């Protein structure tokens, strides 16, 4: 009870101070609020205390968006824009602070799954590769895989990745829509990966189509690491629902993968970064 009161009191004081700072520093407030997604995900470690207070106040004032098509369009426009590259740079420490300590276990399980497969998987594709750190890591963890492809909507980020990892000849980075890439280049014996917030930007219908398209390629495995709203009960609400302040979509991943023809070899959830939302881990195969 005491902790709850402290939390409410802290939130009230921080919100009040943040609103005062927004009023006193309108130019700075406009800079912080210039892009909705950047405002929400901006790395706190790169911000001063006044900026953190202002950011918290500005996030609370964001207009509520409930039209799913509008949300999907706004999110896609952001990830295509150069602002996405700035955000990747802002949040690059997430590889060390979140991915390595919290997510690598799923790839240890993938190694066991691959050891039971009679056929070799020669390609691994990361959908939404961002700054490429995860794909580069996976290329060292799975030396028997010949080809690692990182797909992202941001052309600028892909150009940066190709320069950054030019010495790793196993890696290929492509600026393209994942759905288009799968249709044009997808093949059997491929592992697909999404890491920490990619599929959440797909409309439910579009994601279902993508998973069905991947399933039709032949022998495939999918590892998905995606956020879910802490209040999303898959049993009482089997459909997707809005999630977060961006907002994006909290999908019922087990249902979507099964509907696409996959079988799950892993499903788990854990609190994400100490918050009230969950990080969901899916291992699927056909």
Image (spheres, rainbow, N blue to C red):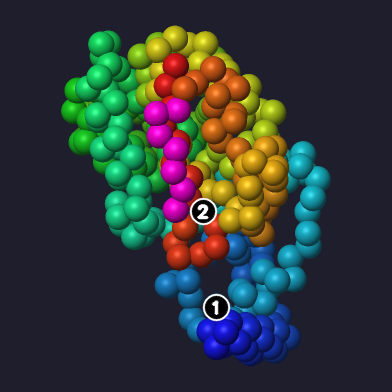
Nearer to the camera, 274 or 187: 274
Asked if 4 appears above or below 157 in the picture, the reply is below
Place of residue 98 in the rendered image (x, y in percent of width and height, measured from the top left): 37, 56
Q: Mark 1 points at which residue?
A: 52
Instruction: State yes or no: discs 1 and 2 in contact (Cβ < 8 Å).
Output: no
Q: Is residue 266 left or right of residue 76?
A: left
Picture quarter with the N terminus: bottom right
Q: In this view, does 268 lie to the left or right of 68?
A: left
Q: Which residue range is magenta in the image?
A: 264-270
Numbered label attached to residue 278:
2
Residue 164 visible in the shown view: no
Numbered label attached to residue 275:
none
Q: Which of marks 1 and 2 is nearer the N terminus?
A: 1
Place of residue 265 in the rendered image (x, y in percent of width and height, measured from the top left): 40, 29
Picture quarter with the C terminus: top left
Residue at (57, 20) in percent of width and height: 260
Residue at (40, 12) in percent of width and height: 219
Count residues near mark 2 (Cα–Cα under 10 Å), then give few for <14, some for 14-19, many for 20+.
Answer: many
Residue at (30, 31) in percent of width and height: 110
Label 2 sits on a secondary structure element that is: strand
Place of residue 52 in the rendered image (x, y in percent of width and height, measured from the top left): 55, 78
Tell me where residue 109 sits by quadrant.
top left
Q: Residue furthest right?
A: 67
Label 1 sits on a secondary structure element that is: helix
């Amino acid at each position: 009870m005491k902790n709850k009161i402290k939390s409410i009191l802290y939130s009230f004081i921080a919100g009040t101070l943040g609103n005062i700072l927004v009023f006193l520093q309108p130019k700075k407030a406009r800079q912080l609020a210039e892009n909705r997604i950047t405002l929400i995900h901006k790395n706190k470690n790169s911000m001063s205390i006044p900026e953190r207070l202002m950011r918290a106040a500005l996030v609370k004032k964001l207009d509520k968006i409930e039209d799913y098509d509008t949300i999907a369009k706004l999110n896609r426009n952001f990830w295509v824009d150069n602002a996405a590259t700035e955000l990747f740079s802002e949040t690059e420490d997430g590889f060390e602070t979140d991915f390595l300590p919290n997510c690598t276990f799923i790839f240890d399980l993938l190694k066991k799954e691959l050891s039971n497969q009679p056929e070799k998987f020669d390609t691994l594709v990361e959908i939404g590769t961002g700054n490429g750190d995860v794909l580069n890591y996976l290329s060292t963890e799975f030396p028997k895989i010949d080809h690692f492809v990182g797909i992202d909507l941001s052309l600028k980020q892909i150009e940066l990745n190709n320069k950054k990892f030019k010495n790793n000849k196993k890696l290929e980075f492509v600026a393209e829509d994942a759905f288009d890439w799968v249709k044009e280049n997808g093949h059997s014996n491929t592992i697909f990966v999404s890491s920490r917030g990619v599929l959440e930007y797909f409309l439910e219908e579009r994601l279902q189509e993508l998973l069905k398209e991947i399933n039709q390629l032949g022998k495939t495995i999918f590892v998905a690491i995606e956020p879910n709203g802490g209040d999303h009960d898959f049993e009482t609400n089997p459909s997707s629902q809005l999630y977060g302040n961006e907002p994006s979509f909290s999908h019922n991943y087990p249902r979507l993968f099964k509907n696409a023809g996959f079988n799950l070899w892993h499903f788990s959830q854990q609190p994400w970064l100490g918050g009230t939302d969950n990080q969901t881990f899916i291992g699927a195969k056909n």
